[in-house]
Image (cartoon, rainbow, N blue to C red):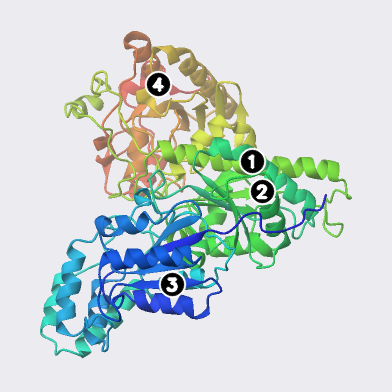
Amino acid sequence: MEVKIEESEKAKQIVVLLIGPPGSCKSTFCDTVMRSSHRPWSRICQDIINNGKAGTKAQCLKMATESLREGKSVFIDRCNLDREQRSEFIKLGGPGIEVHAVVLELSAQVCISRSVKRTGHEGNLQGGRAAAVVNKMLQSKELPKVNEGFSRIMFCYNDADVENASNTYNKLGPMDNLPSGCFGEKKSDTKSQPGIMKFFKKVNALPGSSSNEAANATQNDNEKTRNVRVSPAKLGSADIVPTLAFPSISTADFQFDLEKASDIIVEKAEEFLPKLGTARLVLVDLSQGSKILSLVKAKAAQKNIDSARFFTFVGDITKLRSEGGLHCNVIANATNWRLKPGGGGVNAAIFKAAGPDLEAATRVRANTLLPGKAAVVPLPSTCPLHNAEGITHVIHVLGPNMNPNRPDNLNNDYTKGCKTLREAYTSLFEGFLSVVQDQSKLPKRSNQTALSDSGEDIKEDSERNKKYKGSQDKAVTNNLESGSLEDTRDSGKKMSKGWSTWALALHSIAMHPERHENVVLEFSDNIVVINDQYPKARKHVLVLARQESLDGLEDVRKENLQLLQEMHNVGLKWVDRFQNEDASLIFRLGYHSVPSMRQLHLHVISQDFDSDSLKNKKHWNSFTSSFFRDSVDVLEEVKSQGKANVASEDLLKGELRCNRCRSAHPNIPKLKSHVRNCRSQFPDHLLQNNRLVARPVRQ
């Protein structure tokens, strides 16, 4: 049924508090918007409110109230630098009136320089005196928070951000609303006001109205501002709402009927919003006159879906934060079945914006995708989309093809097409839900680029493999080489560890192996078997436990003994399979004391260590020192003492020693050369208790 598209509710008036010191261009911002906006605005400026002279806060409040009664929206053109100064103006909000903040967080150098050089200022704050005032104000600045009562906060760190913000309000018509939330904020520890006092000393020496030094400082600061790395906002904070931006699936090149597609989008959004907590869903299209956006907006309004949590947005999905002021930590890609760049539209744009990192990360998850399915791909911190836009995940999703000119079309079978499109949105929103749940429960770690549990691409000095909390007995190191190991954990206290988005890959595969059929070798109710993505030997597979809350060896308890035995038996089965192919292969089965990827998993690894992926000391020592806990020992420990012993990560820093003769070597290439030719017997402790699994030598 066709839906008549009309405005379903009256747009709200807006009170916009401009927040920034003198010289941050608050007045210019107001003038720019009011000059061409179709919405009626009133500027409330304390510098001129008293018949062209400076007035009081009370006068500002009175004039703002009168303007709102007249149906206008208002700009509060004051510094508003602390919570107390803002509180009375925030109270102007209420039913039909939203309160926004535009934070002009320009650098101290820029603000001081502009204040010093300007003439004819309304409040007569200019010249050398301005520098002292700006400096004093910045010492007591408090950035606004949503919990003060703001429905929307937009941060601007440079002139480009300010222009973007002014355009946002300039384009706002009388009946338009803006999405709620906090947009563009950098990490709280980002130094957005560097060198205030140092610059202030320079300004004190300047003549009153002009300064080449100040101009140069402004230019230099603008250069620095342009090169600032935008840090993704932290999920779980009170100010940032997890948000999925997604295009309409299958309605472009695949030519799916827009009426039917809009029905399904609204239906699935309504179904999933209650499951997503405070998270938001945003349907994005590049075209201002997009029919699919209009249809979805109208149908969502008919169903009274919360417009703050499900709304439409016009913009480039790869530049929502930098160009549209909308922070989305997850975006969806309407992909092709090959999961490769190419074609046109959203798929080409996202792969281009993300660079080769996305293609490489996608290959870790899947090689192809079936219609109706989705693949969640975490982005490494090196990816341009992660770095510049704050996007932590891309979810590839494939919808039904109704285009008769494209292969594998459904021949206008909308019964099957609608079923597949519903499955596609279900897979997409379930993928987003898993990201929200994982990121809300687990703290992030820095320098997180590794994919392989055995530590691929881990920098020697990175914080990726942080220590477990709690003390670890230093004496353990003395006992490890002999095969003896005492428990190093705090009694009765569970260690805690934060996981990067990359480190969650195994957990996702273990919980949903059916979604990863391209990487899964086998699975049952209790285990999943996959190849290590960066094998450290000729044969290297992982046996994953499918039980929740078993992140690593330290989580194992006596009730998990049966599961551990099953994992061990499955590992032996794969050893037997590999040895049927090559009887000379010798294997160890075991666990890393401190895993680099979430979800308990058993390594089944041949002892040749013939692999290009074995690149550094951590890789080597994680499999050849007592940091590697043999499965047979773990089984005995859990059976006898109810838990497994874990070793110190200090072992990863040890010497490079041959896993057979224990001779020391200066670097990995020389070690590998030696290992290829070493025929010494393995150390005695490995020859005991079936720690090594080898085929008997025929006489």
Q: Is residue 189 visible?
A: yes
**Type of the residue with mark 2:** Ala
Viewer-nearest residue: 688 or 440: 440
Question: How many marks can you see?
Answer: 4
Viewer-nearest residue: 1 or 317: 1
Secondary element at image label 3 = strand
**Cα distance, mark 4 to mark 1?**
54 Å
Q: Nearer the viewer, mark 4 or mark 1?
A: 1
Residue 319 drawn above or below residue 506:
below
The residue carrying pointer 2 sits among few (fewer than 14), some (14 to 19) or many (20 or more) residues within 10 Å by Cα, namely many
Q: Nearer the viewer, mark 4 or mark 3?
A: 3
Viewer-nearest residue: 33 or 353: 33
**Cα distance, mark 4 to mark 2?**
61 Å
Q: Earlier in the sequence, mark 4 or mark 2?
A: 2
Measuring 19% from the left and 61% from the top, which residue is drawn there?
Answer: 140
**Type of the residue with mark 3:** Ser
Describe residue 281's horizontal placement relative to residue 384 as left or right: right
Given contact means CB atoms under 8 Å apart, are the residues at marks 2 and 1 in contact?
A: yes
